[in-house]
Image (cartoon, helix red, strand yellow):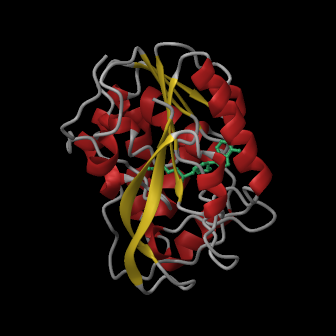
């Protein structure tokens, strides 16, 4: 299977996700291998990168956050019912309704997925943040009217693209351990902070530690030795660069928040480390 070097803008991520890679895709994709049989993405998040992989490629995508994996399973399997549930929620849009939904913990997988997307679109700034009890705690977005909850055509495109995809909810190591010759593994983990105050680790309510970065490096190294092609995005922290010193490291320019309250943005360099 040949990686799509020209980006197909038709299929876009449905969820806004911290660390989403949409804006970096043109820079990243040119370093992806030309040929691979299977695609593995152990840190799926909003899935921006997956959507440039040619449709029909056998794929395994994974995220430790069960909200993400349930959401994409529902999009893949029952998109029409999801849209219906969202339409019902949209009709009730108000600040009060937002906080009611935030408090719920639906048992139905479709209602759970609808809640995920509703909160993602109507919360403050599309943030995703869990408190230490694992509860979503972002305030209401205070828009004057209901924002568009989904684009039907895009949602159905995503659903179709996911058909050949296995969606897993586990730790990254399990998935990377399955990689073999013929596979391309793209990893987009929570980044190693550049300073003690910067952290992008609020997706799971757990911290991605230095020990996790080492565990990730070791799993990727083993996969590369088995013949898989592996690429990893990360910050340009000296710790990460040292870990991957024997890999091919390319610099990627990213526009990111450069201070702790996120209101100043600037270009900072991040890296893509490749085993091939
Ligand atoms: C930077 S985001 C990925 C963003 C994604 N590439 C995109 O474009 O939207 C990192 C993801 O890793 C997930 N994650 C954190 N720790 C993990 C672990 N131990 N195993 C698997 N996934 C993990 C988080 O839930 C989060 O969704």
Q: In this view, does 94 lie above or below 50?
A: below
Q: In which quarter of the image is residue 47?
A: top left
Q: In this view, does 109 lie above or below 267?
A: above
Query: Residue 161: where, in percent of width, then height?
Result: 34, 28
* Vertical relation: 115 (above or below) 166: below
Task: Please report the residue visible at 52 percent of the width from the left and 77 percent of the height from the top.
Answer: 140
- Residue 175 showing in the rendered view: no
Q: Position of residue 22 (x, y in %)?
A: 34, 53
Viewer can see residue 56: yes
- Residue 217 place in picture, x, y as percent: 67, 40
Viewer-proximal residue among 31 and 161? 31
Q: In this view, does 101 lie to the left or right of 146?
A: right
The residue shown at (71%, 27%) is: 174
Q: Give x and y (percent) for residue 68.
A: 57, 45
Q: Which residue is drawn at 62% across and 62% down?
A: 238
Q: In this view, does 184 lie above or below 232?
A: above
Q: Is 269 on the left-hand or right-hand side of 144?
A: right
User: Looking at the image, which is closer to me, 97 or 239?
Assistant: 239
Q: In which quarter of the image is residue 267?
A: bottom left
- Direction from residue 70 to residue 256 in the image, left or right: left
């Amino acid at each position: 299977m040949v990686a799509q070097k020209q980006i197909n803008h038709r299929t876009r991520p449905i969820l806004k996700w911290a660390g989403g890679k949409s804006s970096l895709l043109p820079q990243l994709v040119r370093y992806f291998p030309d040929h691979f049989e299977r695609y593995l993405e152990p840190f799926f998040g909003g899935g921006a990168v997956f959507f440039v992989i040619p449709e029909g490629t056998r794929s395994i995508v994974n995220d430790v956050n069960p909200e993400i994996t349930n959401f994409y399973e529902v999009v893949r399997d029952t998109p029409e019912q999801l849209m219906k549930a969202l339409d019902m929620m949209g009709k009730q849009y108000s600040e009060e309704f937002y906080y009611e939904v935030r408090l719920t913990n639906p048992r139905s997988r479709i209602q759970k997925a609808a809640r995920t997307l509703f909160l993602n679109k109507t919360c403050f700034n599309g943030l995703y943040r869990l408190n230490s009890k694992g509860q979503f705690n972002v305030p209401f977005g205070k828009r004057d009217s209901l924002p568009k909850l989904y684009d039907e055509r895009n949602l159905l495109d995503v659903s179709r693209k996911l058909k050949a995809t296995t969606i897993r909810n586990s730790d990254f190591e399990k998935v990377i351990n399955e990689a073999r010759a013929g596979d391309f593994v793209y990893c987009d983990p929570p980044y190693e902070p550049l300073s003690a105050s910067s952290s992008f680790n609020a997706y799971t309510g757990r911290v991605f530690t230095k020990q996790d970065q080492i565990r990730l490096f070791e799993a990727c190294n083993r996969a590369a030795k088995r013949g898989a092609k592996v690429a990893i995005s990360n910050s340009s922290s000296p710790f990460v660069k040292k870990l991957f010193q024997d890999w091919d490291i390319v610099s990627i320019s990213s526009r990111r928040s450069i201070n702790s309250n996120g209101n100043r943005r600037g270009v900072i360099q991040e890296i893509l480390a490749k085993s091939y």
